[in-house]
Image: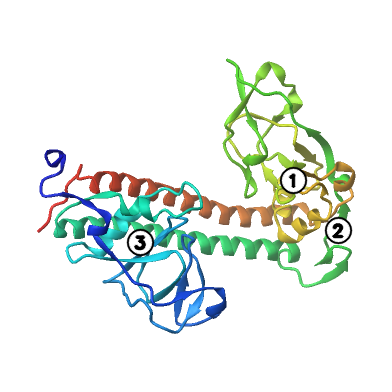
Amino acid sequence: MSKTLPEKWQLREAESIYERLRIPVVFDKTSVKPTGKYKVIDQSADGHIGFIDEEIFPCDKEHPITTFANHTCAVRKMIHPFGVIQNVFPLRPKPDIDAHYLYQILRDAIPQTAYKGHYPELRDTQFLIPPLKEQQKIAEILTSVDEVIENTQSQINKLEDLKKATMNELLTKGIGHTEFKDTEIGRIPKVWRVANFESLVTFSALGTVERGNSETSVPLVKMGNLQSGVVTDPTEFVSKSKLTEENYVSKGDFLFNTRNTPELVGKVANYNLNYQSAYDNNLLKINFNETVSSWYMGLLFNQSCLINRLKRLVAGTTSVAAIYWSDLRKLKISVPKTEEQSLIVSVLHSIQSRLDDSNESIRKFRYLKQSLMQDLLTGKVRVSVN
């Protein structure tokens, strides 16, 4: 086997490259505080259950400790002192192993197959280990990409917070208003009106029940394609011969999920894809009159206050729930003038555009990271070491 290894690389058992540290104190929810100096790490990928003031496992950016979650296989690189709950194992590299390299090779090394103990699988795994200086160079490259991903994710989180706050502000207070009035749906600008949902609708219809592929197939939008107010690319299809004109959706069309689990029923999205699709029979396509923008309605129905009001309309069981047109049509809606609706849509779509760009960037960096790991951690591509 040594002939197949990159020059000067070794194939080593897991426990020859790290030391599993003794855990002097195992914390739980009853023994941590809501605030404190140091986190107590749980088994989620990036979570913790609370804080402590004791320095149980000292570490820093230059000398990190890798933790492995026995049941979830979550691997974390700790650069600040920490404590752990049961079944989170701190692993310190052996003297000839770079701490950052150890973290990189343990990430995704063991896939979670069930909620069970996975450490025996990790312990029995063999890893390719280059000389220390090469480890350090590889880790430096992969860590730099990790930092870009983390910074981009931080930008995404801030944009998500900005979008949420801006939605709440614009969809309840509008733009530049100083006079407000109390209504049955809360306080709104004085010049806005309250309308029954039904009075704004010119057309509504459920989609097709047909399924299946053919030479003339059309993408089929289903409940699961309604994500964060927009429609993701469908993966199912329906024969074009089975469709009528009303079974198609166009850019901007408002789709309402009438049937799903209690948590997901009532989800709304505007059709935003650049090709023609059909939509299934659990989705209600709704067209509006000239006083209402479908894009504005899509934003409004994804605003927390209206979502909470929709939940009161849910009927059905704990597994399958529905919102019926007989109830939905009576829903009270706040309606600004069309010009203000356009401004609100423009502002929020601008934030969404920045979010889309950031999400696309992080997708590309994650793909780059995956490719680099496949090349660098196998020795397929060697790094030069001074």
- Residue depth check, mark 3 versus mark 2: number of the one nearer the observer: 3
Residue denoted by label 3: 147
Please rate how many residues cluster around mark 1, counting C-alpha atoms within 10 Å: few if below 14, some from 14 to 19, many from 20.
few
Q: Earlier in the sequence, mark 2 or mark 1?
A: 2
Would you identify the image quadrant in which residue 303 lies? bottom right
Residue denoted by label 1: 319
Identify the residue at image location x=67%, y=43%.
270
Three-letter residue code for mark 1: Ser
Q: Nearer the viewer, residue 292 or 172?
A: 172
Q: Nearer the viewer, residue 181 or 6?
A: 6
Please rate how many residues cluster around mark 2, counting C-alpha atoms within 10 Å: few if below 14, some from 14 to 19, many from 20.
few
| Whole-number angstrom distance, CA of label 2 to CA of label 1 | 37 Å
- Quarter of the image for the C terminus: give it: bottom left
Q: Could you tell me which secondary element the residue under label 2 belongs to?
A: strand
Q: Is residue 8 left or right of residue 315?
A: left
Q: Could you tell me which secondary element the residue under label 1 belongs to?
A: loop
Asked if residue 190 is positioned above or below residue 275 in the image, the reply reads below
Q: Earlier in the sequence, mark 3 or mark 2?
A: 3
Identify the residue at image location x=48%, y=75%.
27
Please rate how many residues cluster around mark 3, counting C-alpha atoms within 10 Å: few if below 14, some from 14 to 19, many from 20.
few
Residue denoted by label 2: 193
